[in-house]
Amino acid sequence: MKEQREILERINWDYLIILDACRADYFEWCNNIEGEYHRVLSNSSCTQEWLKNNEKYARESIVFAGNPQISLYWKEIAKCLVEVWDFGWSEEHSTVLPNTVTDIAISTAKPKSIIWYMQPHFPAIGRIKLTPYLSKEKSKYYFADTLVEKMLKNREITLDQYKIAYWENLRKVLGEVQRLLDHLSGTIIITADHGEFLGEKDRFLHPCGLKDKELIEVPLLLIEKRNNV
């Protein structure tokens, strides 16, 4: 299996689209976007690790940050950081909605941009809504998915509901990525920072420092799109 970093460094991409916490297997089941697909190995099992391990991309790119963690680790080093999580925060959903990221990227993204969506990372914003309240400021240090995990362990939701909620988050964000692609031209990569435990061996979320396949096997879709905008 190829290393994600090797492909990102080898290809002179114009746009790098990150789906936060997106597992390769769920992406393969859900995705309808055409391109050259690879299942690849991330060098990280959590966002913090990915941001630390891949700082070079921040220095070279315009970063559209749907995840508040990006501001903690890349604010001082990014070539240009657009804090979508800050001005686009949804109090109702305790997260940044994918359509907000898409709208901002459509209007301002240029070649050599990283467009980072929060989904399929929890909170869940589909038909099954798992959105425990978390303020914008606290979201940089605490994680709504940890609160969702407590709901699961307290039997407020079932494991099936948990998986469906993740699936629906992924479907929503892929729909927004497709809308974004209609406005982009060039070499585009869609990938993820890490995956997610969804109940395997009674484990959940995405702890740092692990090498389990559910966490480090992520999708990478390469799209060549010229003169179509």
Image (tube, rainbow, N blue to C red):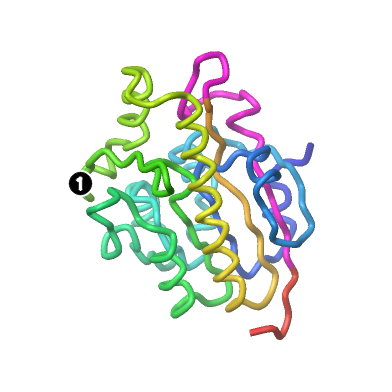
Q: How many marks?
A: 1
In the image, taking residue 207 as reference, residue 23 lies left or right, namely right
Question: What residue appears at the point 49 percent right and 19 percent down from the top-left corner?
Answer: 203
The local crowd at label 1, few if under 14, some if 14 to 19, many if 20 or more residues have their Cα within 10 Å, is some
Residue toward you, 22 or 179: 179
Residue 42 location (% of width, % of height): 63, 39
Residue toward you, 111 or 36: 36
Is residue 33 highlighted in magenta?
no
What residue is shown with label 1? Answer: 135
Residue 106 location (% of width, % of height): 48, 76
Question: What residue appears at the point 57 percent right and 57 percent down from the top-left corner?
Answer: 174
Relative to 61, residue 74 above or below: above
The quarter of the displayed image where residue 83 is located: bottom left
What quarter of the picture does the N terminus occupy?
top right
Residue toward you, 46 or 104: 104
Of the residues shown, which amino acid type is indicated by label 1? Ser
Q: Secondary structure at mark 1?
A: loop
The quarter of the displayed image where residue 183 is located: bottom right
What quarter of the picture does the C terminus occupy?
bottom right
Relative to 177, residue 31 above or below: above
Question: What residue appears at the point 47 percent right and 42 percent down from the top-left corner?
Answer: 52
Residue 201 location (% of width, % of height): 56, 14
Q: Residue furthest top?
A: 201
Question: What residue appears at the point 27 percent right and 44 percent down from the top-left corner?
Answer: 139
Is residue 202 highlighted in magenta?
yes
Q: Residue furthest front?
A: 127
Relative to 92, residue 204 above or below: above
Residue 31 location (% of width, % of height): 67, 52
Give the magenta range: 199-223
